Image (cartoon, rainbow, N blue to C red):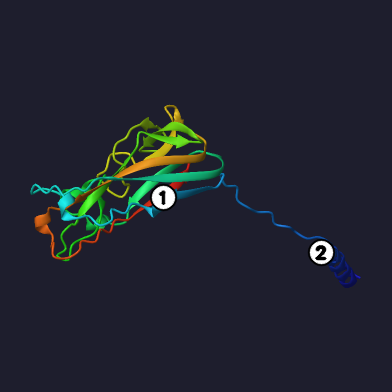
């Protein structure tokens, strides 16, 4: 009897388990909630200084500077979105001397001799356009407190930089919810002293920076 009882008890324990396996199931529910999606566009893909004749240079033994060029960054979002823009220099390794630790100087490549070709600076206009209306361009070092400023746009990957790194369109009170935004920029190019360059051949300017859109 004890043996039969044990068997029956085991059967009574296993039958409901088998029945549950046949008649129930689990549906896993997952996903990720994200902010309104935004797209970023740099007009013309960037700035092309084109062919610059030596006659445009004002070389006084120091540096040669062609006229600055203007461009724009455009952001379009599927809904009102708080955003900021960050920049990184992809050619920082071509900067030398004092410019290497200059948070506002971006590299443009090196000459065949290995010397620095020069650098450029990016200066946002004081005002942009947000949702079709004029709006100041704000900057911040921590994406928490914001001020209005038209100083050079500084990059983040310079350890000695204590300037601002983030830009955002908004008001004096802080960033605004963006459906569309236009941020005008001026790019100023500085060529190294002509005496340090081989002027018997073309000088190729090769600047590159990555602009990243960050949600606030």
Is residue 24 rendered to the left or right of residue 77?
right
Give 31 or 78, whichever is nearer the viewer: 78
Residue bearing mark 1: 42
Looking at the image, is mark 1 or mark 2 earlier in the sequence? Answer: 2
Q: Residue at x 9, y 47 (%)?
A: 60
Query: Picture coordinates of residue 7 (x, y %)?
Result: 86, 71
Q: Residue at x 86, y 66 (%)?
A: 15
Q: Residue furthest top?
A: 173
Query: Picture coordinates of residue 52 (x, y %)?
Result: 22, 55
Q: Residue furthest right?
A: 1
* Mark 1 crowd level (few <14, some 14–19, many ≥20, 10 Å Cα): some
Number of numbered discs: 2
Q: Residue at x 90, y 71 (%)?
A: 4
Which element type, helix, strand or loop, lies under badge 2?
Answer: helix
Asked if 72 appears above or below 203 in the picture, the reply is: above
Q: Is residue 143 visible?
A: no
**Mark 1 and mark 2: span between their CA atoms?**
62 Å
Which element type, helix, strand or loop, lies under badge 1?
Answer: strand
Q: Is residue 12 visible?
A: yes
Give 13 or 166, whichever is nearer the viewer: 166
Q: Residue at x 40, y 53 (%)?
A: 44
| Number of the front mark, 1 or 2 | 1
Give 38 or 160, whichever is nearer the viewer: 38
* Mark 2 crowd level (few <14, some 14–19, many ≥20, 10 Å Cα): few
Residue bearing mark 2: 17
């Amino acid at each position: 009897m004890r043996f039969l009882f044990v068997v029956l008890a085991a059967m009574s324990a296993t039958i409901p388990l088998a029945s549950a396996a046949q008649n129930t199931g689990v549906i896993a529910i997952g996903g990720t909630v994200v902010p309104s999606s935004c797209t970023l566009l740099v007009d013309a893909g960037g700035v092309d200084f084109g062919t610059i004749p030596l006659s445009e240079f004002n070389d006084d033994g120091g540096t040669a500077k062609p006229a600055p060029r203007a461009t724009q960054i455009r952001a379009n979002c599927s809904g009102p979105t708080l955003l900021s823009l960050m920049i990184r220099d992809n050619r920082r390794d071509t900067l030398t001397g004092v410019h290497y630790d200059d948070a506002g100087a971006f590299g443009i490549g090196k000459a065949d001799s290995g010397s620095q070709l020069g650098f450029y600076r990016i200066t946002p206009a004081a005002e942009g356009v947000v949702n079709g209306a004029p709006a100041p361009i704000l900057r911040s070092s921590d994406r928490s407190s914001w001020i209005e400023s038209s100083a050079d746009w500084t990059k983040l990957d310079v350890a000695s930089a204590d300037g601002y790194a983030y830009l955002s369109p908004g008001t004096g009170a802080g960033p605004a919810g963006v459906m569309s935004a236009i941020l005008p920029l001026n790019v100023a190019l500085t060529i190294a002293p002509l005496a340090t360059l081989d002027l018997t051949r073309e000088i190729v300017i090769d600047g590159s920076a990555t602009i990243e859109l960050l949600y606030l």
